[in-house]
Image (tube, grey):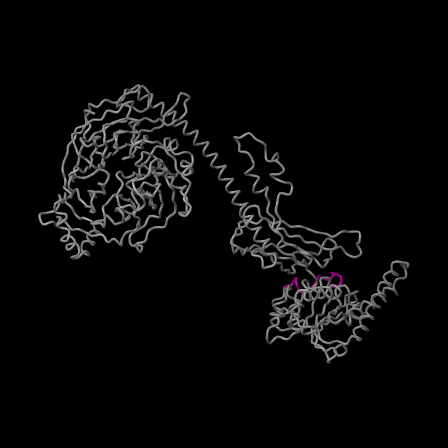
Amino acid sequence: MAGLEPRVEYLESFRCPLGGLAAGRPRVLCHGAAVFVSAGSERVSVYEQEGRLLTAVYSFPAQVRHLELSAVPPLLYVLCAQKGIFCLSPDPESRSMNQDDRGDRDSEDDKDSEDGEDSEDGEDSEDGEPPCAVISVDPAACLLPDATLCTFTVVGDKLVTLAQGPVHWKVQLFECPRPGEDARPGSQVGEVELSTSSPLAGPLGDPTAPHFLPVLCCVSPAGLGALHSRAWGSGGFLLERALFGLLFGVDASLLESPVILCGLPDGQLCCVVLKTLVTSKLSPGDPKALVKILHHLEEPVVFIGAVKTESSPEDVEDTRPDCLVALGHDGRVLAIKAGWDEAGTLVPELREYRLPGPVLCAACGGGGRVYHSTTSELCVVDLTQGGVPNGGLGGLPSLLCPAGLGVCSVVTLSVSSEVPEGGVRLLALSTRGRLMTCCLQLSSEVPGPTRAAAASTGQRIKDLLSGIGTVSERVSALRKAVDQRNKVLTCLNEAMNVSCILLSSRESPRPISCTVTTAWSRPQLQDVLMATCQLENGSGLSLDRGWALCVRVSTRAAASDSDVASVATTYTVPVYRLGPGDRREVTLPLGPGEDGVLHLPLTVSCALHYSLRDVVGGALAPSESSEGPSLDECPSDVLPELDGVCLPLSEHTVDMLWCLRFPGLAAPHTRAPGLLGPVCDPVDTFLGSVLGPRSEPAGPASLKAKFLPPSVATIKVSTELLRAALGDHHSAGTSLGCAALQWLLAENAALDVVRSRQLSSVQGVAPDGADVHLTVREVAVTDLGAAGPLQTVEIRVESSSPASMCGTHHAVIGRLQRMVVERGARSPGPPDLRVQCLQQTHSSYETLLREVQTLRDRLCTEDEGSPDATAQRLLQVHRQLRNPSLLLV
């Protein structure tokens, strides 16, 4: 240390109370060429180093306890005792604006304070006025009012404060307030209490200031600090990643989170990981879980910093600190750095030293040097291995020998800048309020490490980097596995939410729905009935990996194939990234089948299926480097045989009314060539073209239509019941017959044309090619009403094919049955009817039903050669049952 040659220069004198400045309150901060000085009073002075003059003095409502600068944007935060935190811009233009807007108010304030402050003012003139403008800060401009705050620090866009409670210290995390935002404090996002081994100085809100103020600073890992160095405040510093992980644990390293270090007046050195602070001030965090006590100095902590003790190769510029330093008021020094034990494991190396006290202030400089001031002298100690050897390569010196610099009575200290020659320039404030610079020049006589020590140190660094690389690879693999499991848990959570909203909305409209529409298409020479299933996500959740839409199409076998069970086909379509409000369409064929016949009715069931094996299987599979069971060997309770969840969405019955085609309704120029009707037999088409348009075809269908009467079925419904069932479907200006026909054809593709033309009768074509005539009209039934004729609506189905008529009649009956069950309760009571007439009608229908059963039994027992008469009579009885029909009231 003999090579350190100080050169002291006095810059300015500031206001000083009687008896001199006390340690712990004054502050000196640099911002470019500007120096912000707080001499422990209510004023903060701005001194320009280039012009060597005071440019402004800010007068705050109470004594200033702490200053801190934020880099981006440049803001000066000031903590006043019993008031809170104020914020102002250090920009010279904003200061000039404040001076212009100040007016005469500051002059009056200064004149009022002349009598009480002249005797204590070292920078004022004889009449009590300072040599520059005094800018008064309004007490209402306090951005974070809190009488219990003792210190704070700025970390990016966050403000960390330390408040004095009745029993515990309390660390609070706020969104960094900005000036001009309604002067309101930022929102609190975290809070934790620090345990203390001794009672605090006074109760909450006690105006008596504590004898020793706590120390608060922010520590960031070296890599993170390099990325976000512009967002640091003046109270933060970097630390080598190896030492950072050893001190603060795996959580802070993996989260890459800054850590708040707290040095308390009772000697405790605590740390809190910034990203783990509790997010509710009503339920503060558990100190045992969030707060870690690094050490106990057993005396008030006055300084926390970090230095670089290991030398770097000449071609590598590495200034990352690798040693944490804490100083106590009575001279106890704690130094912690990363070292190696006998087994080659990376461990923290901790050493305590004793220096002459009391320590008033301290600062860390380059070259592993720590500057500290006592009541008698400003001293410096060297923590590098070259200070005092201890035989351990790369370790800390066994003894610290302070070297005096010949400067006394320094109460606050700040490292201004490094000079090219390897020295340092310090800014200091004396007990008499004098701002001075102390330039230290390092001579070439200072001994350095030997070559052998440097070579061994280089090998140790290589080994350390190799160990860090291995740990980094393991951390990367673990992080990848954790990320994969987190994604799986997120997917399972969303699947659970989707299941809950679908299962809880059985009675109400479901937020995720699937609608089915049908249309005829002719992809080849045969007409095919196609179904379009539209899946719509009306919820706030997303359907991602693992979800699939399952559509099951089932039909009952024909009556003649009694030995054949029902046929069902299931289509599964994966759903990829169906977000809120998105839709997905799936088109699939319904028939005809391999036998060329479309078996109606069809049941189309839609459901969502979630595959647990697709989602969870990858997370349960072992990594390449691990040795464990494969996915197929996972326990059955983890991946059960039924590895999915099925959530039904809707079920639709596709009957004859869905499949009817109406070629005559479409305009001639809009008719698709393949959708005008069913496919005709090629021979009939050829004969028709040869015989000409006037010739009558002689096919079976033509003969059946010419000589056999059409099959007719009628259904009568009371007008009151139908109006109550239709509800909103029966709009004003629309006849009841038109509304009823539109209700019957609600799922048919021709609905829009029927609605636009207000039709009550349509001529359609069944899937087998037979004509089907639907007519809806209002009729009066005269023989049932006791008070007169009953107004009813008659639905008439007429077709030359008995099978087509039966299919259409069955579809109409099904709709009316559902109408009576769902909407019949809304209709008024039934009208007065003639009971005797109803009994006669009911008796005649029972007679016909008994005759149907007898005829069917006879068909089973008669010879195969002579069932014609019985079949003809059975057909006649069926016609009598369907026309005229019973009345629905």
**Can see residue 222?**
no
Q: Name the residue: 29% across, 38% down.
A: 215
Where is residue 175? Give x, y as percent.
35, 48
| Residue at the extreme bottom | 788
Where, by quadrant of the figure, is residue 888 drawn? Answer: bottom right
Foreground pick, 844 / 855: 844
342 over 542 or under it: above or below: above
Q: Quadrant of residue 355?
A: top left
Residue at image point 56% right, 48% down: 496
Q: Is residue 567 above or below residue 785?
A: above
* Left or right: residue 754 compared with residue 790: left
Q: Would you say 542 lies left or right of 255 here?
A: right
Q: Nearest the camera: 517 or 686?
A: 517
In the picture, measured across the screen, residue 866 lies left or right of residue 675, that is: right
What are the residue bounds of the magenta stretch?
A: 672-686
Give 362 or 715, whichever is nearer the viewer: 362
- The reply to whether the magenta stretch includes residue 796 is no
Measuring from the top left, give residue 521's x and y in whole percent: 65, 59
